[in-house]
Image: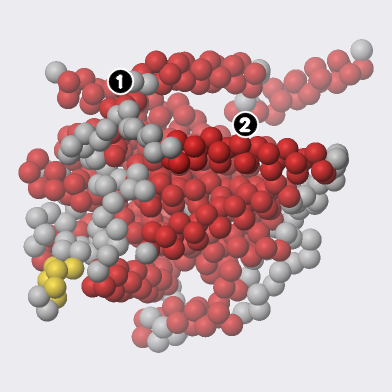
Amino acid sequence: MDNAYLIETVIKVVVILLVFSALAGIGTYFERKILAFMQRRLGPMNVGPYGLLQVAADGIKLFTKEDIIPTNVVGPIFKIAPVITAATAFMAAAAIPFLPSFTVFGYEVHPIVADINIGILYVLGVMAIGLFGPLLGGMASANKFALLSAARASAVFISYEVVTGLSVLAPIMMVGSLSLIDFNNYQIENGWILWSQPLAFILFWIAAFAETGRTPFHLVANDHEIVDGFGTEYSGMRWGLFFIGEYANMFFISFVIPIIFLGGFGDGTVLGAFALLGKMAFFFFFFLWTRAAWPDVRPDQLMWLCWKVLMPLAVINVVITGFVMMF
Amino acid sequence: MFEAVAFYLFAFLTITMFYITVTTSQALYALSALAAGMIFISAFFFILGADFLGAVQIIVYTGAVMALYAFGMMFFDTTREVKENHGNQYIVVGLGTLAAILVVVIFAVPMVSTNMQAFYPMTEGAGNTEMVGMVLFTKYLVPFEVAALMLLVAMVAGIVLAGKKMDLSLTLMNAEEIQEIEDQKNKKVLS
């Protein structure tokens, strides 16, 4: 392994960590602003111009707040749970190609940390580990509401992982590879997978809301309980890590959906790179839009939707794709 | 060099995690350590270049098996220590050591005798995902399908066990119907 490769990888890891930690903070600003505009409010206005420095103020607050470990909790597990959420979110980023490769000072840079040939499987698998954050946090909290929320969250994650896996199986069959780069290259020649797999796209998109725990499926924190689900006992930066993990996950899944279904960065021109960022921005905006427009569904409705509607549809989609490809 | 460092690091971490799993009396520690150990094992697959198996290891063992463990844990108070019934410590340690030595010998003998051959040599140009598929759907087709059948049987059995009163949904009933059910229960208790 040569030194150039090592230095390049380290730089890429650091850049991704810094950019997406910052984006997670700015994402909260976007969320508050967009929700506010949709509800005819102004949102944060007082800190800085248009409330832009609210992010910094929140950061200072989270970092300097006292880190309270309540009595009766299982200390080490309680402390490590938020780290798991944030770490798995960023680990998933290792296999995502964020931009087409470009040249800096005659050195070709591939903006993907590890181009493993099972990219999509790795991303979904690592996001699945993210389940352990809420689960362990809730179970270690010595709080009944946190435990209930952890149980609900894990039920949702496990159920919707099935939908995610089955819905993405049909595009994988068409491309014949698990690498996200191959997905991108396939769509340069054959057009967007969205046109040949619209059902898979819709299913994957719906499941993405469950995987990130966003509003129509935001069962991790049940509003009727007034408490914040598995994060009830957390304070300060540990609670902030849960938040960073959630927003980083939203950003990464907003990258993955366009790469799989909407042509990714295309043929690698500057225009293609901006198109990918634009698509990512749209999907991120859609997360916020849905939160403003829809109430949460009940847990039993959610399970009904998963097992009686989405999963059979996904299986039928896989079978039909198989038949079409065979004949 | 990197591979050696990574191997020893993950070997150490894996053994530590499984040691914690076995020795701790705190159920939550055991659960978390087991999950972590399973994830660290996938690192060996990645080091050996078997990316597909590594990802499958992560998904299957942590995503599915551990989540089911967690559901089992929901029935206990996981924040309290479990009082374990310790038997004869010497027998446990002795048998454990013996088993470990046997496993090492079983795997080390073919390497020492330099009589190792690959039954299924690598196909040129096939990635490791394709290789797994080729072996799975030719040589191991019958065990693969039998496993699928067994999972189907387990699923049907699970639904039958859990499916009593499945057509009854309290959330979809109005207050009178729920009251009726309550009255029936009370009658049974009284009579």
Q: Nearer the viewer, residue A289 or A70?
A: A70
Report which quarter residue A325 is drawn in: top left
Closer to the camera in the image, A39 or B36 = B36
Q: Residue at x 74, y 51 (%)?
A: B24
| Residue A100: % across, % down | 16, 61
Q: Which residue is mark 2?
A: B171
Is A172 situated above or below A64?
above
Horizontal side of residue A218 vs A264, given as left or right: right
Among the two numbered marks 1 and 2 on one chain, the one whose residue lies closer to the N terminus: 1
Few, some or many C-alpha atoms within 10 Å of disc 1 (few <14, some 14-19, many ≥20)? few
Q: Quadrant of the C terminus of chain A?
A: top left
Locate residue B3: give its quadrant: bottom left
The type of residue carrying mark 1 is Thr
Q: CA distance from mark 1 to mark 2?
A: 49 Å
The image position of residue B180, as x and y in percent, is 75, 20
Q: Position of residue B138 (x, y in %)?
A: 30, 20
Give the residue number, with chain letter if any, for mark 1.
Answer: B138
Name the outermost residue toward the top.
B191
Neighbourhood count class around disc 2 (C-alpha, 10 Å): few under 14, some 14–19, many 20 upward: few
